[in-house]
Image (cartoon, helix red, strand yellow):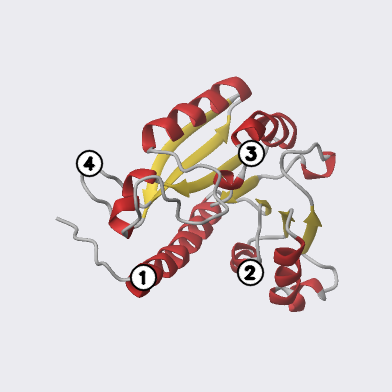
Amino acid sequence: MYQPRGSDEHTMTQMTSLHEERLNFVFRTIKTTGARRVLDLGCGSGSLLYRLLADDQFDEVTGLEDSGVSLRQARSVLADYLNEEPARVHLIRGSYAESNPALAGYEAAAMVETIEHVNPEQLSRVERAVFGEYRPGCLFMTTPNREYNPLFDLAPGQFREEDHKFEWDRLKFQRWARGVAERNGYAVHFGGIGEFVPDVGHPTQTAFFTRIG
């Protein structure tokens, strides 16, 4: 049975390792779809975009990010690619809770550890924008699995990051995702990333939405 270790340094090492594993998993998942145009919603400092751009399969990748600080970091990380002619990468300042016709029509999209930063009362707006307007051919979403938090030595009710507005257990995440899929013409399949623990699940839970309507 998994035994947590009571060390902040150990927990930080676990989180960093999981972050890299998660990004690589998302990259591989998107690559297997065959998509050539990809939208990263909540792209942060550009770590997933960097992985996509290093692969010749992807002709166009667009990152949307609401944080100016993160967007500046992304511009630094992706500087070489932004200077290409023609550029394959585009960075946009904005929120995926807002309408933006320019974000419609992508073959694949990703939302990596970002939905939990949304205020719960804004989730319906996110659904309308992402699944009702942008309508990517498929979308891969990751979010923390709250049931795993004790194994990171987190106290009851403590979130993995201070900025998180919520963290879902598996049942609640799947219930929400199924509702989104049914209302917007998508199929959805669930999985996880990181070490699986019986009765707890994976540290990261995933939903893969595929448009059927």
Mark 1 or 3, nearer chain start: 1
Callout 1 secondary element: helix
Mark 2 and mark 1: Cα distance apart in space: 29 Å
Q: Residue at x 65, y 63 (%)?
A: 49
Q: What residue did someone put label 4 on?
A: 199
> At label 4, which amino acid type do we have?
Asp
Callout 3 secondary element: loop
Mark 3 and mark 2: Cα distance apart in space: 21 Å
Q: Residues within 10 Å of mark 4 (few under 14, many from 20)?
A: few
Mark 1 and mark 4: Cα distance apart in space: 24 Å
Quadrant location of the N terminus in the rendered image = bottom left
Query: Pointers 3 and 4 in contact (CB under 8 A)?
Result: no
Q: What residue did someone put label 1 on?
A: 8
Residue 137 marker: 3
Callout 4 secondary element: loop
Mark 1 or 4, nearer chain start: 1
Q: Is residue 34 left or right of residue 61?
A: left
Mark 3 or 4, nearer chain start: 3
Eye-nearest disc, 3 or 4 = 4
Mark 3 or 2, nearer chain start: 2
Is residue 202 visible in the rendered structure shown here?
Answer: no
Q: What residue did someone put label 2 on?
A: 50
Could you say which is closer to the camera, residue 88 or residue 202?
A: 202
Mark 4 or 2, nearer chain start: 2
Eye-nearest disc, 3 or 2 = 2
Eye-nearest disc, 1 or 3 = 1
Query: Pointers 1 and 4 in contact (CB under 8 A)?
Result: no
Mark 3 and mark 4: Cα distance apart in space: 33 Å
